[in-house]
Image (cartoon, helix red, strand yellow):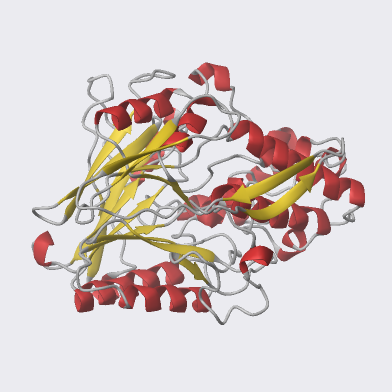
Amino acid sequence: MQSDPLALWTYHDEENMEHTFWRYKIELSVLEVSQVVAYEIDGVTEQANFHVPASEQNFRWASHSCNGFSSSIDPTEWNGADPLWNDMLAEHKKNPFHIVMGGGDQIYNDKIVQEAEIAPIFSSETNHANKSPLTPEIATAIDRFLFRNYTKWFGSGTFSQAAAYIPMVNMLDDHDLIDGFGTYPDDLMKSPVFNAIGSRGYFFYLLFQMFMNDEVDGVSNEDTSDPNPSPFSSLIIGGPGAYIPFPTHNLLVKLGPKQYMLLLDCRAQRKLTQVCALDTYKRCFRELRALPPTAQHVIIQLGVPLAYPRMVFLENILTSRFNPIIYLIKKLLPSFTNNFNGQVELLDDLNDHWCAAKHKHERNVLIERLQEVALKQKLRITFISGDVHAGGCGYFYTAMNTSPAKDHRYMLAMITSAIVNAPPPGPVLKLINTLAVKKHRSLFSINTRERMLPMFKNNPDGSKQSNKYIIGARNWCAVDYMEDSNELKFDLRVEKSKGSSE
């Protein structure tokens, strides 16, 4: 362990107390056998440990997303946040995980708009979001909320226990900042208060989830010519942020001799018309092309699923300025719209999707380029995502009858969400499953088809169900590398009943 820890930043609270973020560098020799490393922290009575795989062993890992409750959900109805984290820790004791991958929304910061200094700005009656200046009082309130919310959420419950025993590898999504950040029009995204919430949210995300501070680690938003000026070998710095003063922070993590994971930052450059800019894609693909010949399988982590039933018709309805029904509902049901800019609440979620009209071309180009990498480098590529509060799996494949083992276009797209948040209502799930069978032509030009897998013939309690493609229950995923076939085994752990730990 590094003898002299690095001070990343000091937060000064309103009681003049100092809270310093310290980073310790831990270097271990990887041996021919697996190891259990025990450690202690001053002031904490319990000794913790984590597992290090053997030098020729590929990691066993867990994946989760949406680790918090939406503002409209009553946590007591779901027995709080612990049930599925209890299940993960129980599985960890049986067969240890080497890392846990957070696929976005590790924390929900949406309630920041309820802070006393901020609430009047986003009130449905006044809604001064685009006009209000960023005063010192509001800036203080933003940092105060983020610090308290992080220390409370990351320092309590079974989630904090899991973080003590399983090393985290995280990538953010919108709720790590605030609901829908990046998917609103320019006037809101550039407004002083809303922009500050997203910018400070990203700063605290780097501190609490990536354990870094750009200013300390030599990362600049103005000059991103060096893809990794920091001490983290897995970090890929992309292009400048769209609305925030931070470039994209992507990760290419080695999970053993044959297994790698690329976590793509799909939030720092996100706009209504863009998920990531070309400079970020360029640097990430450069690192993929530099993988050693031993690499067999690459997991691409994307916050929002790449393959998912499309609701383009709903997107068109909700964006129409001339739909009298939408106008009437807005007047009768204020909760139907958000308090940021008055648009329909569901619209930011639809605009986030890769298959939204303004993102579909970018999605198709990404798939095509990954197919080229898979073919040239003889890699199997698999996607994993969250965001949608439901579980399922899509897949891409060559149009002709090519066996998956010989098909470089064959890519599974696993969906695991949410480990804490509530699933969508029954009618929404029924609609999504109905749309799951619809065929799409958007990838025909590159000889590719896409489908959803009918994985769920039964409900978690064993009874028959009609929703075979997308399951509406809390879940997380355990992943094992199959050494004999170089395949990944995904075990989607689905909550059997509401609020249970099994």
Q: Position of residue 197 (x, y in %)?
A: 74, 51
Residue 24 visible: yes
Report the residue at 17% width, 54% height from top.
487
Q: Nearer the viewer, residue 287 or 382?
A: 287
* In this rendering, position of residue 388 left or right of residue 475: right
Judge from the rendering whether residue 461 lies leftward or rightward of residue 401; answer left or right.
Answer: right
Dividing the picture into quadrants, the one containing residue 55 is bottom left
Residue 219 pos. (x, y %): 62, 70
Looking at this view, is 94 or 321 the one in front? Answer: 94
- Identity of the residue drawn at 23% across and 50% down: 54
**Number of callouts:** 0
- Above or below, comparing residue 176 to residue 497 in the picture: below
In this rendering, the answer to whether 173 lies above or below 66 is below
Q: Quadrant of residue 107?
A: top right
89 sits left or right of 174 in the view: left
Residue 40 picture location, percent across and down: 49, 34
Look at 67% across and 36% down and name the residue there: 149
Q: Nearer the viewer, residue 319 or 102?
A: 102
Give the residue at the far front of this rendering: 3
Q: Residue furthest bottom?
A: 225
Q: Quadrant of the C terminus?
A: top left
Residue 115 relative to residue 184: left or right: right
Residue 127 in view in this figure: no
The image shows residue 116 at horizontal and vertical percentages of 85, 35
